[in-house]
Amino acid sequence: MNGIDGSTAATLIAAGEGWLWLGGLTAAAFLLFGLDRLEPSARGAYAFRALIVPGLVLLWPLVLWRWWVLARRAWDEQQRHAPPLPLQGRAALALAAAVPAILVAALAVRQPEPAPRAPVPLAPPAAGANSR
């Protein structure tokens, strides 16, 4: 059988819902308790908080991890804004090269457009075909 059966689809949907619920809880906790402590410039910036909610919801594991790291080392200003991983700069360069390469490859292997066909006039509906 090709495709996804009903139980697999239900499992994927339940996993997605769980991810979003955890992300929503993380976003609410971070906006209420973490943002002001970790970033003093965000105090009073309430419109900014609404803008970052989608990112917080989708990237909640990274938010929790970064919140934990910054809460432990809040005194070290040099490390405060350092990348979370030593290889993050290299990963950013690799993605900057990979995204255009993937785009070019996708355009190169795309399917040709179908051959144009002459338009076919539609016939009027038969009398009584749509009567209720």
Image: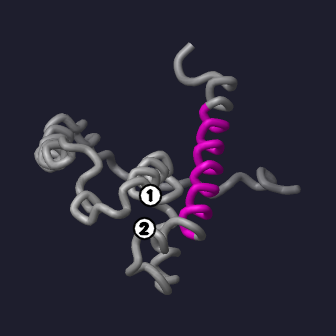
Q: Residue furthest bottom?
A: 44
Decide: is 91 above or below 125: above
Q: Is residue 19 visible?
A: yes
- Asked whether, in this view, residue 41 is left or right of residue 27, the answer is left
Task: Please tell me whether the stretch drawn in magenta is mainly helix, strand or loop.
Answer: helix
Q: How packed is label 1: few (under 14 Cα within 10 Å), some, or many (20 or more)?
A: some
Q: Is residue 107 visible?
A: no
Residue drawn at x 46%, y 51% is 68
Q: Residue furthest right?
A: 132
Quarter location, residue 18: top right
Mark 2 touches mark 1? (CB < 8 Å):
yes
Q: Position of residue 106 (x, y in %)?
A: 20, 40
Q: Nearer the viewer, residue 81 or 54?
A: 81
Residue position marked by numbered label 2 in the rendering: 38
Disc 1, SS: helix
Residue drawn at x 78%, y 54% is 130
Instruction: Look at the image and say whether residue 9 sits in the magenta stretch.
Output: no
Decide: is 55 above or below 61: below
- How far apart are the two marked residues, 2 and 1, measured between alpha carbons? 7 Å
Residue drawn at x 29%, y 61% is 76
Q: Nearer the viewer, residue 41 or 90?
A: 41
Q: Position of residue 45 (x, y in %)?
A: 47, 84
Mark positioned earlier in the residue sequence (2 or 1): 2
Q: Which residues are magenta?
A: 12-31
- Asked whether, in this view, residue 111 is left or right of residue 126, the answer is left
Q: Position of residue 104 (x, y in %)?
A: 13, 44
Q: Which numbered circle lies on residue 71? A: 1
Q: Nearer the viewer, residue 32 or 16?
A: 32
